[in-house]
Amino acid sequence: MRVLCVAALCAALGGCASVARGTSETISVATTPSGAEATISGLDQPTVCTTPCAFTAARSADITVSLAKEGYEPQVIPLTKEITGSGGASFAGNLLLGGVIGMGVDAATGAAQDHKPNPVIVTMKPVAPPAPSPRPAAKPKRPKAPPSPTS
């Protein structure tokens, strides 16, 4: 009876990550100052949004966020994929239940992974002002001519 209860508990708590967490996630992007154009590469379709914004991406996608705003240096933020606590627990649920197929699905879809950083928060750096051009040497001033005598 105990074995049956433990098996039922494992079935209720464990499960594959693709079912428990899904194969996609929402990623937020914010900049200081706001209003930067964020170009997201690595998605099925190229995506551009104005910060602050959010987009949905497959957990298995290799994502790069490129940020641009007039007067500021462009920035490129590559996102990494990490197995997190909840993703790892869901993935481990496959082991407890003998779900080799579930493990394969999770590995293929990246369902146990999360993109980092999320949210993407960037402080834009102002473009450095151009270096001042050297001033030409000042010409020496000529002394004023003495006033001419009037007759």
Image (cartoon, rainbow, N blue to C red):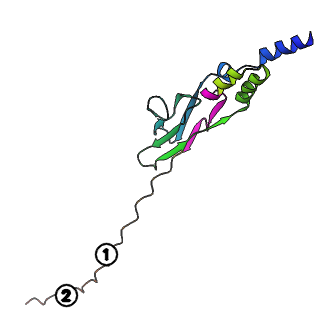
Q: Name the one closer to the observer, 123 or 43.
A: 43
**Residue located at (53% from left, 40% from top):** 31
Q: Residue at x 36, y 72 (%)?
A: 134
The amino acid at mark 1 is: Pro
Front residue (pair 143, 39): 39
Q: Residues within 10 Å of mark 2 (few under 14, many from 20)?
A: few
- For residue 21, which quarter of the picture? top right
Q: Is residue 105 left or right of residue 49?
A: right
71 to 111, vertically: above or below: below
* 34 relative position to 148: left or right: right
Residue 1 placed where, x, y %?
Answer: 92, 9
Quadrant holding the C terminus: bottom left
Residue linked to disc 2: 145
Q: Which residues are magenta?
A: 107-122
Residue closer to the observer: 55 or 102: 102
Image position of 55 with respect to 141: above or below: above
Residue 47, horizontal then vertical, whole percent = 45, 31
Q: Which residue is mark 1?
A: 136
Give the amino acid type for the residue marked by disc 2 in the picture: Ala
Check residue 111 for magenta coloring. yes
Between the C-alphas of marks 2 and 1, the distance is 26 Å
* Residue 94 occupies quadrant: top right
Picture quadrant where residue 107 is located:
top right
Sequence-wise, the earlier of marks 2 and 1 is: 1
Q: Residue furthest left?
A: 151
| Residue nearest the viewer, comparing 27 with 142 | 27
123 over 52 or under it: above or below: below
> Could you tell me which secondary element the residue under label 1 belongs to?
loop
